[in-house]
């Protein structure tokens, strides 16, 4: 076994690998970009080395391995994990690449070659045709419509085009070819019969260099949005023991066909109504969703990877693999479902991760989530003796999670795993898109939340210790006590609340600007550890809480809200605040200003493009909120901006 291993990755997967290295007594070496200098994976490794060129800096990684005495490199997933040239460079440098041979990576990285290879080994494949051996128009006529066009070198759904008729085919082929050439540098395409409402089920395989190949059961990955997995589980609620064994045997043959070693995943498209399954592709690395397999098998897949890479045989046979219970994983992303899933970011002001379940996380309180890398922050994984209990535990764990300062998709995840079709196990890859409107529907901010924010602000005016009675903001005066007014802006607009009395001993809150007094409730505020206990009327609720200048962040039940205190006279303290009438043009996500299309003094119309902001290779056009004149332009091309940063001001009063 190795005594030092370099982890050529970042975030939660680097931490996941480091955890196993530590348990095995192996020294861990982290690498990091400048943006990640203070990241958690850097802090928790035994040694950390800066990469001047970032995580794709192959020369820098090899130099770091040499300088730290590493004997092996674990690539994690993403970045260089499926890069055959990198695996060869490691071997040339005398380092063990913890992964399959370069030849296997190449064979499975080319979708056309992979299909031909596994088909020759007897693995079922989707009927279709591929270039250069087939004319795609003739192949489409043979297999019928609908059909799916894919780039041979592609991945992640990029460049895939669904064609429902022969008339659509020429333009669809041209579009797919342009995307393939631009995204992958290879315009080669294939076409397959489109399986309607398929399920996405993958088999985890593990192989050693001594001829041993086993599978560790399946994972259901059908809950996806735009071809990206969101929630995964093991085992699949669809498969029976016989189908599991047949698909597992097919996956093993696929791995054998390319001389595979290490951990890999063979992905299948499954027709839910018939149970027919077809090879889709093989991922030649550890998968993001590997924890659900670990929880139902009791095996550490990273440890198995390391032992295989060190030349050891697999420690178990197929007959010894046992699946116990059920596990479900949810991916927590820095994205806002209520803004079309745009990437978010910011400083993590407060972090609460749930006990009693597995959390693979790269988050750190005080850390910054930027726009340089993938928006996945963590994974929450729950095990139960059966599927219902695993889903229930996952929902409870997500409810107990709070990431204040960075908007996330947690409330969306809770809505998804509680959807009746998901609870029933009636899954397919189109489920999320079909039900997206109801999954992201919102009834508005609950009344208790802005009330709690107002109480937090009110308490801050209470002086500590002995104080002049006139300095205590309890509203005392002759006659009826006076109200203090708070105008709080959230994602749903501006909330006006009135508070009087002392939150610690007894206060009153008047909700939503109700001047009749009918909305008045008694209120108490108390701290319990890092949490806040708020009593409104007869109900006590617990919140995670954080401050960022004039903004109060509150979290409960997996959701989080930011309330900005609007003071008299500022732009948020007038009619239209938080809406188009505000005139403030804000960035919808953290990122970089790519294009500025206007200048101060320009007359613009509502909806006119003003700027383009780019983050995580996603461009978003920012438009004028109203007719008017550009009164201020606060950014320039190339400038980094935070989410909701004011980019420009359009004065709608100018005519």
Image (tube, rainbow, N blue to C red):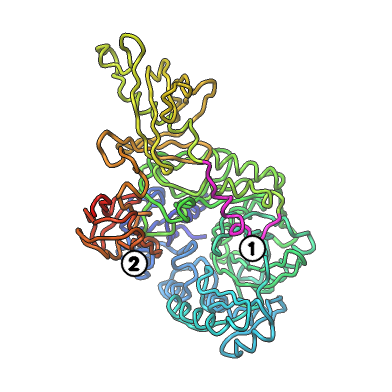
Residue 431 colored magenta?
A: yes
Residue range highlighted in magenta:
426-443
| Left or right: 143 as drawn, with respect to 149 | right
User: Tag 1's secondary structure?
Assistant: strand
Among numbered discs 1 and 2, the one appearing first in the sequence? 2
Instruction: Indicate the position of residue 597 as horizontal and vertical percent values.
Output: 27, 65
**Residue farthest toward the top in the current orientation of the protein:** 478
Comparing labels 1 and 2, the label whose residue is closer to the camera? 1
Quadrant of residue 195 within the rendered picture: bottom right
Residue 204: mark in rendering: 1
Question: Residue placed at 58% from the left, 39% from the top?
Answer: 356
Residue 36 appearing in the image = no
**Residue farthest toward the left in the current orientation of the protein:** 601
- Tell me the distance, in whole angstroms, between the alpha carbons under discs 1 and 2: 32 Å
| Left or right: 141 as drawn, with respect to 491 | right
Instruction: Indicate the position of residue 301 as horizontal and vertical percent values.
Output: 59, 57
Query: Who is closer to the viewer here, 294 or 313?
Result: 294
User: Tag 2's secondary structure?
Assistant: helix
Figure check: 262 above or below 431 = below
Image quarter of the C terminus: bottom left
Mark 1, other Cα within 10 Å: few <14 / some 14–19 / many ≥20 = many
Figure check: 488 above or below 286 = above
Question: Residue placed at 61% from the left, 89% from the top?
Answer: 134
| Left or right: 242 as drawn, with respect to 302 | right
Residue 204 appearing in the image = yes
Question: Residue placed at 43% from the left, 31% from the top?
Answer: 512
Query: Who is closer to the viewer here, 225 or 16?
Result: 225
Q: Where is mark 2, residue-wise?
A: 60
Residue 26 colored magenta?
A: no
Instruction: Indicate the position of residue 370 as horizontal and vertical percent values.
Output: 36, 54
Figure check: 106 above or below 384 = below
């Amino acid at each position: 076994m190795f005594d030092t291993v370099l982890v050529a990755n970042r975030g939660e997967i680097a931490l996941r690998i480091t955890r196993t290295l530590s348990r095995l007594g192996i020294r861990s070496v982290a690498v990091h970009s400048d943006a990640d200098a203070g990241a958690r994976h850097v802090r928790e490794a035994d040694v950390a080395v800066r990469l001047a060129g970032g995580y794709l800096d192959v020369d820098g990684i090899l130099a770091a391995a040499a300088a730290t005495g590493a004997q092996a490199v674990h690539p994690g997933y993403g970045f260089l994990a499926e890069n055959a040239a990198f695996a060869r460079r490691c071997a040339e440098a005398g380092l063990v690449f913890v992964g399959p041979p370069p030849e296997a990576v190449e064979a499975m990285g080319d979708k056309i070659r992979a299909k031909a290879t596994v088909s020759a080994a007897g693995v079922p494949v989707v009927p279709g045709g591929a270039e250069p051996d087939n004319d795609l128009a003739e192949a489409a006529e043979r297999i019928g419509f609908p059909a799916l066009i894919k780039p041979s070198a592609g991945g992640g759904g990029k460049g895939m085009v669904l064609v429902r008729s022969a008339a659509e085919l020429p333009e669809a082929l041209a579009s797919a070819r342009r995307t393939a050439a631009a995204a992958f540098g290879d315009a080669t395409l294939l076409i397959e019969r489109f399986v309607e409402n398929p399920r996405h089920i993958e088999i985890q395989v593990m192989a050693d260099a001594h001829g041993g190949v086993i599978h560790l059961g399946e994972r259901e990955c059908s809950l996806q949005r735009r071809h990206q997995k969101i929630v995964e589980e093991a085992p699949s609620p669809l498969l029976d023991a016989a189908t599991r064994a047949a698909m597992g045997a097919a996956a093993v043959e696929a791995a054998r066909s390319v001389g595979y070693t290490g951990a890999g995943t063979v992905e299948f498209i499954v027709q839910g109504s018939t149970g027919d399954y077809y090879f889709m592709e093989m991922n030649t690395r550890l998968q993001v969703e590997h924890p659900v397999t670990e929880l139902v098998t009791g095996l550490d897949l990273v440890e198995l990877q390391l032992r295989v890479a060190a030349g050891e045989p697999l420690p178990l046979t197929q007959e010894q693999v046992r699946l116990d219970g059920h596990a479900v994983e949810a991916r927590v992303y820095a994205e806002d479902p209520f803004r079309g899933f745009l990437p978010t970011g910011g400083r993590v002001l407060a972090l609460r991760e749930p006990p009693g379940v597995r959390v693979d996380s790269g988050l750190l309180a005080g850390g910054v989530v930027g726009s340089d890398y993938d928006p996945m922050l963590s994974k929450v994984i729950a095990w139960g003796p059966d599927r219902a209990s695993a889903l229930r535990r996952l929902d409870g764990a997500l409810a107990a999670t709070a990431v204040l300062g960075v908007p996330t998709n947690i409330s969306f995840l809770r809505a998804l795993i509680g959807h009746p079709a998901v609870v029933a196990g009636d899954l397919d890859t189109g489920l999320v898109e079909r039900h997206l409107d109801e999954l992201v529907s919102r009834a508005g901010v609950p009344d208790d939340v802005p009330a709690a924010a107002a109480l937090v602000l009110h308490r801050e005016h209470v002086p500590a210790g002995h104080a002049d009675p006139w300095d205590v903001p309890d509203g005392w005066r002759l006659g009826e006590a006076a109200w203090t007014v708070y105008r709080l802006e959230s994602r749903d607009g501006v909330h006006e609340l009135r508070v009087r009395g002392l939150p610690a001993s007894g206060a009153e809150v008047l909700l939503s600007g109700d001047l009749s007094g009918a909305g008045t409730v008694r209120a108490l505020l108390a701290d319990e550890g890092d949490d806040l206990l708020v009593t409104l009327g007869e109900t006590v609720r617990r919140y995670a809480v954080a401050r960022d200048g004039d903004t109060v962040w509150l979290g409960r039940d997996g959701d989080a809200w930011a309330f900005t205190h609007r003071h008299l006279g500022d732009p948020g303290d007038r009619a239209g605040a938080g809406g188009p009438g505000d005139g403030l043009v804000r960035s919808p996500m953290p990122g970089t200003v790519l294009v500025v299309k206007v200048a101060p003094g320009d007359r613009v119309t509502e909806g006119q493009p003003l700027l383009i902001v780019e983050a995580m290779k996603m461009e978003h056009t920012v438009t004028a909120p109203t007719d008017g004149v550009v009164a201020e332009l606060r950014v320039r091309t190339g400038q980094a901006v935070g989410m909701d940063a004011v980019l420009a001001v359009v004065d709608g009063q100018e005519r």
